[in-house]
Each structure stands twice: as C-alpha cells, then as structure tokens.
Image: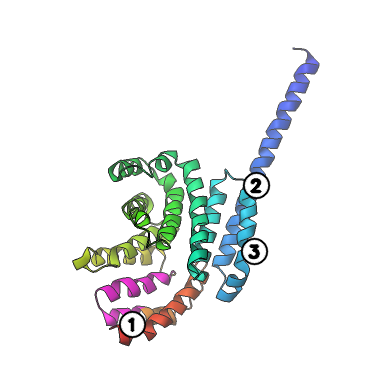
Amino acid sequence: MGYNSMMKTSIALSFILLLSSCASLISSVTSDMADNLTQAILNQNDLETVRDGAPAYLLMIDSMIEGDRENPRLLLSGAKLYGAYTTLFVDDTERANRLSKTSLEYAQAALCLELESVCAALDAKQVEFEVTLSELSKSDVTVLYGFASAWAGWIQRNTSDWNALANLPKLTAMFERSVKLDGSHDSGGAHLYLAVLASQLPPSLGGKPEQGRAHFEQAHEYASGHNLMVDVFMAQYYARTIFDKDLHDQLLRSVLADTAEYPGFTLINAFARQRATQLLAESDEYF
C-alpha cells in the first residue's frame, strides 16, 4: 500500500472513529436530557403544573427515542415518565391503557437490548423464568427493575384481564430478585412493590400482610422516610387489611405533617398528601 493510500485509509478511519465518538456523545447528551427532564418533573411540587405540561414532555421524549431506539437508558427514562404520568394523572380507562402500554413497550425494548435471556424467558414457565433471573448480577438491577415497574403499571391497568393477572408470579419474582441483588435500588422501590403485592389480601385469602409490613419498613428505611407514598400505601393496604385504625390514622397524619419536599420525591409526595387527606376522611366510615 502506497503512502497516499495509507494516509487516505488513516484519515478515513479517523473520520469514522470521530463520527462514532460524536454519535456516542449525542446519545449521552440525549439520555442526560431525558434523565434531567424526568427529575425536573419528579421535583415539581405543583401537581396541576405537571398535569398540564407533562403531555408536551411525553412528546419530547417520544422524539428522542424515535432518533435513538437502541438506547436502553433513554428507553427506561421514557418508560418511567409515561408510567408516572399515567399513575398520577390519567383516570380515563382507555387512555390509561394506551399510555401504560407505551411505558411497557419502552421498558421491554430496553430489557430485550440489555437482558436478552430475560426477554426471551418472559413466555417461559415460572420455574424456567426464575432460573433465568437467578443468573443475573447486581449490574442488571436497573433494567430488571425498570421493566418490572412498567409491567406492574400495565397489569394494574388491566386487572380485568386474566392473562395479565397470570403474570403476577413472574412480576413478583422480578421484584424479589431485584431486592436480593440490590434492595437499595430506587430508594427501596422493589420493596414497596412487594409490600403492596403481599398486603392487598388478608391471610384468609392468601395474603401475607406481615411480610408486606416488613417490606414497607425496608422501603421506608431505604428512602430515609422521604417517600411519603410508603406510609400512604402502608395505611391503605396493610393497616386496612389488618383493620388497625390507630396505625392507619397515625401513618396518614404523619404524611400530612411532613414538609414533603425532598429531591426525587416532591411530586409523588404532593400526590401522597392529597391521597392521605382522602383516606383519612374515609377512616371513620371504613373502620
């Protein structure tokens, strides 16, 4: 190969590497923007501001994903944003189903990019699925938990569908594996999901409220008491299930007495205080 040919090859190679580097940088900046956008929303203390503005943010993150469909971090940000918006603000059943489906699709795309074995095992038998989960490591928690959270949101919106409810054992297994690998992830978020799953029914109907209480306490500890939805859900699901009015009212009053503004929890805490007010008003009638 002549000197000129070598130089042309070297320049071409350098150009390709530069383009690759720029693409990676752009991808990182886009992901950072999506993450920052999600955090800005979660740190907002006015529910109506987010309710009115969030649809524009959803379209923005859709456009980011459209330009970078193989970016797991971006996909998970989209899944989280869609999931939070649907849970907090969407009452219309048909619309909630559509949006929770988008959240799940984004999360599943991330799962299939990062954890191919789990993606392939979603339709496998429970035993095989749990074997696949057992092979995961701590570095897999972000994607595993991100998908499980979106799946939980979708199942919640499709409780009349027996096929959806049939996936609860796999969903529970994913959260249990997340807890085993890193119980502190997302400030104990997997513990909170497991707490609700265990506490919704009394023991006579197969529920495990005391197991749920242990998960609520772990979630509270990992969030340093900053996630007020832990106490609201503990009142709603655990205290009501075991018919403990004193605990129920104590938990809800502690939520209403809290300042509620903590990084990453401010929006959800605004909703928690609103929900606490409703539950407390119903207390005498319920008990």
Q: Is residue 265 left or right of residue 21?
A: left
Q: At 67% from the left edge and 46% from the top edge, which residue is drawn?
A: 26
Crowding around mark 2 (Cα neighbors within 10 Å: few <14, some 14 to 19, many 20+) is few
Observer-side mark, 1 or 2, equals 2
Q: Which mark is residue 225?
A: none
In space, the residues marked 1 and 3 are separated at their CA atoms by: 38 Å
x and y percent of residue 77 in the render? Answer: 54, 55
Sequence-wise, the earlier of marks 1 and 3 is 3
Residue 241 among those drawn in magenta: yes
Q: At 67% from the left edge and 38% from the top edge, which residue is drawn?
A: 21
Crowding around mark 3 (Cα neighbors within 10 Å: few <14, some 14 to 19, many 20+) is few
Residue 123 sits above or below residue 166 on the image: above
Q: Amino acid at mark 2?
A: Gly
x and y percent of residue 52 in the render? Answer: 61, 72
Q: Nearer the viewer, residue 110 or 1?
A: 110
Q: Which residue is mark 1?
A: 249
Q: Amino acid at mark 1?
A: Asp
Q: Residue furthest right?
A: 4
Residue 168 in which image quadrant: bottom left
x and y percent of residue 39 in the render? Answer: 56, 62
Q: Which residue is mark 3?
A: 56
Q: Which element carries disc 3, helix, strand or loop? A: helix
Q: Which residue is mark 2?
A: 67
Q: Which residues are magenta?
A: 227-251
Residue 145 among those drawn in magenta: no
Sequence-wise, the earlier of marks 2 and 3 is 3
Q: Nearer the viewer, residue 250 or 202?
A: 202
For the C terminus, the image quarter is bottom left
In space, the residues marked 2 and 3 are separated at their CA atoms by: 17 Å
Give the dominant element type of the magenta stretch: helix, strand or loop: helix
